């Protein structure tokens, strides 16, 4: 209604914002993890197909991707397609001490990747480091998103610290199951939005992005 404040745009701060994020994160993760394996597999293939068809992906030479973790959609078809097309595939590694992500290129997801300290698949030590400035397309992970592009991650803040350091021209694209799309994601001033969200049902292009 006109004149009413949107609490996610103007109100929540501090403890209230953290509690709102925590509650939504738990709710969406529970819904995501209830997806049947066959539903999850079909949806992941649809997401991958939509992403691979994006002109921005086809034109990119150095792509920052993520590897599937727990109940996330399977990104390996994207990784393999990018490698097959001759792109440089970059995957982040967590630097726990610095609370930052470091970027490394992989050429074989079987040989070059292992679970890191938090169980997240990461590049091994032999993988070549990649400069932030080289990245020209980004697949952004997240727990939930809304149609304005707002994103809620797992709570570590790693991508909120990484994304501002990447080239501005590199599209920030998220992939997600449609159960991960909600009406409003509670966001603070330092939370980073994405340029598009790809689900098994649609491509969401936030207005003005």
Image (cartoon, rainbow, N blue to C red):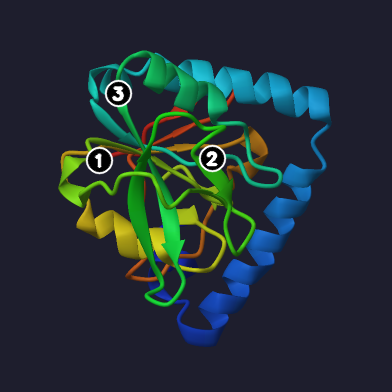
Quadrant of the rendered structure where residue 188 is? Answer: bottom left
Q: Earlier in the sequence, mark 3 or mark 2?
A: 2
Name the one closer to the observer, 121 or 146: 121
Q: Position of residue 156 (x, y in %)?
A: 50, 69
How far apart marks 3 and 2 lie (CA) works out to 16 Å
Label placed on residue 177: none
Q: Is residue 146 visible?
A: yes
Is 85 located above or below residue 27 in the figure?
Answer: above
Q: Residue sitting at 64 percent across and 41 percent down?
A: 72
How many residues crowd around disc 3 within 10 Å: few (fewer than 14), some, or many (20 or more)? some
Residue at 34 percent of width and 14 percent of height: 85
Residue 36 sits in quarter: top right
7, 38: nearer the viewer: 38
User: Taking 48 as reference, is 176 above or below it?
Assistant: below
Look at the numbered disc 1 and give the secondary structure of its residue: loop
Disc 2: which residue: 67
For disc 3, the marked residue is 87
The residue pinned by badge 1 equals 208
Alpha-carbon span between mark 1 and mark 2: 29 Å
Tell me the SS state at disc 3. Answer: loop
Please name the residue shown 47% across and 29% down the image.
Answer: 108
């Amino acid at each position: 209604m006109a004149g009413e404040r949107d609490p996610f745009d103007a109100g929540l701060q501090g403890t209230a914002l953290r509690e709102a994020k925590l509650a939504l994160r738990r709710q969406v993760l529970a819904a995501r993890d209830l997806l049947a394996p066959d539903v999850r597999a079909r949806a992941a293939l649809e997401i991958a197909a939509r992403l691979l068809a994006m002109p921005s992906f086809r034109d990119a030479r150095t792509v920052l991707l993520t590897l599937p973790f727990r109940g996330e959609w399977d990104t390996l078809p994207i990784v393999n397609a990018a490698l097959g097309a001759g792109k440089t595939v970059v995957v982040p590694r967590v630097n726990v001490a610095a609370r930052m992500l470091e970027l490394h290129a992989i050429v074989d997801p079987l040989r070059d990747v292992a679970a890191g300290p938090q169980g997240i698949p990461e590049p091994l030590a032999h993988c070549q480091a990649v400069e932030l400035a080289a990245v020209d397309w980004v697949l952004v992970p997240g727990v939930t998103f809304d149609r304005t592009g707002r994103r809620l991650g797992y709570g570590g803040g790693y991508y909120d610290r990484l994304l501002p350091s990447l080239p501005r021209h590199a599209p920030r694209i998220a992939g997600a199951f449609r159960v991960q799309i909600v009406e409003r994601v509670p966001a603070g001033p330092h939370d980073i939005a994405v340029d598009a969200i790809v689900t098994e049902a649609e491509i969401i292009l936030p207005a003005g992005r």
